[in-house]
Structures are given as structure tokens and as C-alpha cells.
Amino acid sequence: MLNLNGYFENSRFLKSEIIANIDCDIMCLTETKLLNENTIDLSDYGYSFVGHNRRELHRRAPTGSGGVGLLVKEDILKEFELVILDKSFDGVLAISLINKISSYTINIFIVYLPPENSVHGRDAAALFNHLIYLTYLHCNYDKFVIVGDFNARIGLKNDVDMELDCVQMREPNVDTHSNQHGEEFLDFLMESKLCIL
């Protein structure tokens, strides 16, 4: 997962080189900040891009804001079919990679929730409600993962029920603060039976 913080003309070459040198088969991107139907073209590096740009921009935004995307190596797409499951909610892109021979299925949700003080970050509950709906709908496959930047601070609070869940204790977090996004995130994790890695 990489928070791009924009893919603009003045930083495009550097960010493309960083992505190329990381050399992942699949890379989830947040804060692409692309406008309208703009995309990221990294075909010279062997990647295909699927994105979901924010539809509504603040009137004072000089560039795009938010946005999520997925880069997949073209070699992977020779073996897997990429299907978009959902991109109806700003900040959420749900995709499925289905093996063309065995039907082995990997579902990936890429999520960006803006900070609480952002115009777009004030309704975390709606995002998490949409995410729980998608989770229930698409979690029963071979692999399922949610990746993203939630701007959710949970401090030292547990993301699992230690009495019921058989999950190894998460390493202590260096961030001891929490926020409302964090509270909403914890509610989502408890309801979906997922945990933070």
C-alpha cells in the first residue's frame, strides 16, 4: 500500500520510479488526487491501473483530492481476470482477481477515509456502513483483504475481543491517541471480525 499524496506533473517521474523500484505484483494506492477520468500510466513498467477518482471536489480544491487505485503487473493479468466489484462510494474501490484456470479468487478493497477535519472526512459512519455491506457480500472467497489509509487513530485500544478471538496480540502502537474515526474503525472491525495487521 502506498499513499501517493497526489500524482502530479512535478512529481510524476519520481513517484513512478519509486513504484517501479518497489516492484510489487499488486500495489494499492491511496490519495491519488486524480481529476475526472485521469489515470496513472505505468505501462512502461509493466503495470495496468484501475482507479476510482473522487467525483465531488471542494470548490476551492486546486487539484484533485482523495482517490484510490490499484496497480497490477500485466504478468498477473495473464493468469487472473480483474473484476471491479464496486466503486459506487467515494474512497472505496473493491476488486476481485480470479484465476483463469482454477477460479482461485482474491478480493481486495482499497479505502481512503480523509481526516476528520476535512470536508470529505466528516461522514466516516457512511463509509464504514458501505464497507461492512461489501465485506459481508464478498468475504467468502479464497483471500480477502482490506487495505487503506483510514486516518483512524485507535491508540492503545484493542481491535479484537481478546476473550473470544484467537488472534496474536498486536505490537504496542507508538501512537497513544485516538479519534472519532478510530472509534468508528473499531466498531467496523468488531462487527466484521477483522483485525489490523
Image (tube, grey):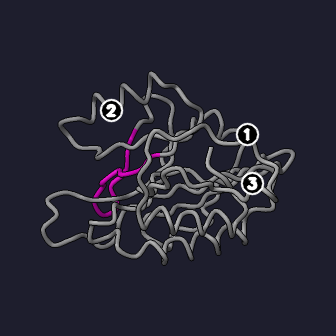
Residue type of the residue flagged with mark 3: Met
Q: Which residue lies furthest to the top in this view?
A: 21
Q: Judge from the rendering whether residue 189 lies leftward or rightward of residue 41; answer left or right.
A: right
What residue did someone put label 3 on? 162
Are discs 3 and 2 less than 8 Å apart at CB? no
Residue type of the residue flagged with mark 1: Glu
Counting residues from the N terminus, which is met first, the one under dot 1 or under dot 2? 2
What residue did someone put label 2 on? 15
Label 1: which secondary element: helix
Q: Is residue 131 above or below residue 33?
A: below
The magenta-colored residue range is: 29-41
Quadrant housing residue 62: bottom left
What residue did someone put label 1 on? 79
Which residue sits at x=23%, y=43%? 8
Count of numbered circles on the image? 3
Residue type of the residue flagged with mark 2: Lys
Between circles 3 and 2, the one closer to the viewer is 3
Which residue sits at x=69%, y=50%? 97
Q: In this view, does 149 lie above or below 42?
A: below
Q: Does the magenta stretch include residue 100?
A: no
Depth check, front residue: 29 or 175: 175
Quarter containing the C terminus: top right
Q: Where is residue 110 drawn, in percent x and y?
A: 53, 55
Depth check, front residue: 155 or 22: 155
Label 2: which secondary element: helix
Between circles 1 and 2, the one closer to the viewer is 2
